[in-house]
Amino acid sequence: MEKPNTNQTDNKVLCSDEIEASADLGQYLSDNDQILLPVVNLIEQSKLSLDELINQIGRLVIEGLLKASAAQLAGPKQQGKRNGGKPIQWHGTQAGSVSLSERKIKVNKPRLREKGKGGREVEIPLYRKLQNNRRLSERILEIMLCGVSTRKYQQVLPKAAKSAGIRKSSISRQFIYQSGEQLKKLCERPIDGDKILIVYIDGMVFGKHHMIAAIGVDQEGHKQVLGVSEGASENATVVKGLLVELQQRGLKANRKRLFVIDGSKALRSAIDEVYGIDNFVQRCRKHKIENVMGYLPDYLRDQVRSAMRAAYKLPFREGVARLKKQIEWLQREHPRAASSLLEGLEETFTVNRMDLAPSLQRVLCTTNIIESPNAGIRRTAGRVSRWESGEMVLRWAAAAFLHVEKRFNRLMGCSHLWMLKAALSDGAVSNNLAKNGEAA
């Protein structure tokens, strides 16, 4: 078979920046179809699987491109001759590897040296560019967040292990680096606080480590992960630190917002201290019901749970009155359950006081919005048997939150958010009503 012309001009066409689009490459291959004949023969005669064949073709193509790139510096390689007029000379080959999106491929790359005794090694421009490709690291992070452990990663990318020897320790290092970058990105990205109407805050537990996270919702119903912090929501220092950080990044205290929280007293106090007493706070009803149930015997739980759920559907004053009667009834036999129900009672009815559409009330009365991605993080991290540090927890949480953020839907009932915006700016509806009612 006739060999294609390998002069310097053709080499330049193959690998230079002049090939700017796939149409140009297609036209080149069409005009020089003899280049593809070895590939056709390989396909027709090969007994390899399709993946193996693609891997081999990819290796050959990359090695050809590396040679073409080297030829731009040292001139065409000629058997038994040295390019006397060139300051850079061919100097054999050496093993290397190139990162593709989901694998690394071992290649034999040319070596170049400066002319003369003791000449320095010269780097091939294309090889350096391929080495700086971070798509492999990013793909590793994505696959791990989808639930693949480092021990099983070689099964997901079998060609990677075979072609470049990727091992568990290497994948772990890649994940640590990438998740650290994600944590830095989350902690540093600015927040457009003027658009945020709602802030959900909830906690999670990873082994012995606690973490709190905040998600914001803007006027159009779009959700955004605002931040994460190590520590429990009952820790006043931790929750205040998170809120101060959010304020520094753009969530200023220049407008009223609705805070939906898990019921923590420390978190409730920190909101007043950092953002002022005029903001609205809705305590999560799901958390409240679970807390009360924890103080009741099994035979009473269904009854009290049903009574609480029914009361939450009533207008503010009527619903509060019904639950206060429930508290009086519980006080005699189960005082701790009664105290739990009474604590922050009016703030479990905040959205009822704002006369919002029922579809919007349903998503504003619980922290389910933040608990849903939390559940995804727990599934993702469920294979982790030992949480070594809070820093490890934060890296995992930040990476997982930013991963699920890409698939966030708009808030249910978002078409009625104008009603919430109006209620937040209406001076006649004061959040102090809840405190006054609680004091009574």
Image (spheres, grey):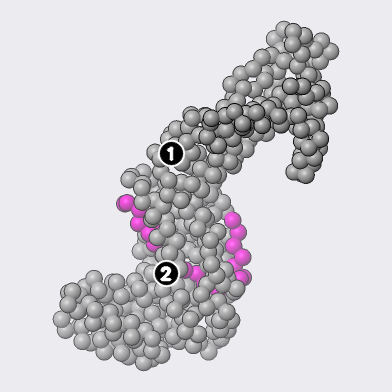
Q: Quadrant of residue 234?
A: bottom left
Q: Measuring 65% from the left and 33% from the top, which residue is drawn there?
A: 130
Q: How many marks?
A: 2
Q: Secondary structure at mark 1?
A: helix
Marks 2 and 1, the one that precedes in the sequence: 1
413 in relation to 19, above or below: below
Q: Which residue is mark 2?
A: 368
Say if the magenta span includes residue 103. Answer: no
Q: Is residue 368 left or right of residue 45?
A: left
Q: Could you say where residue 142 lies in the image, as x and y percent from the top left?
A: 51, 48
Residue at the image point whose x is 67% and y is 18% from the top: 111
Q: Residues within 10 Å of mark 2 (few under 14, many from 20)?
A: some
Residue 253 position within the rendered picture, expressed as x and y whole percent measured from the top left: 56, 70
Q: Nearer the viewer, mark 2 or mark 1?
A: 1
Q: Quadrant of residue 235?
A: bottom left
Above or below for 248 versus 436: above
- x and y, in percent, of residue 271 in the image: 46, 70
The N terminus lies in which quarter of the figure?
top right
Q: Is residue 190 magenta?
A: yes
Amino acid identity at mark 1 = Gln
Between 73 and 268, the one lying in front of the other is: 73
Q: Residue at x 49, y 88 (%)?
A: 355
Q: Which mark is residue 155?
A: 1
Q: What secondary structure predominates along the stretch shown in magenta?
A: strand
Q: Is residue 153 visible?
A: yes
Q: CA distance from mark 2 to mark 1?
A: 35 Å
Report the span colored magenta.
189-211
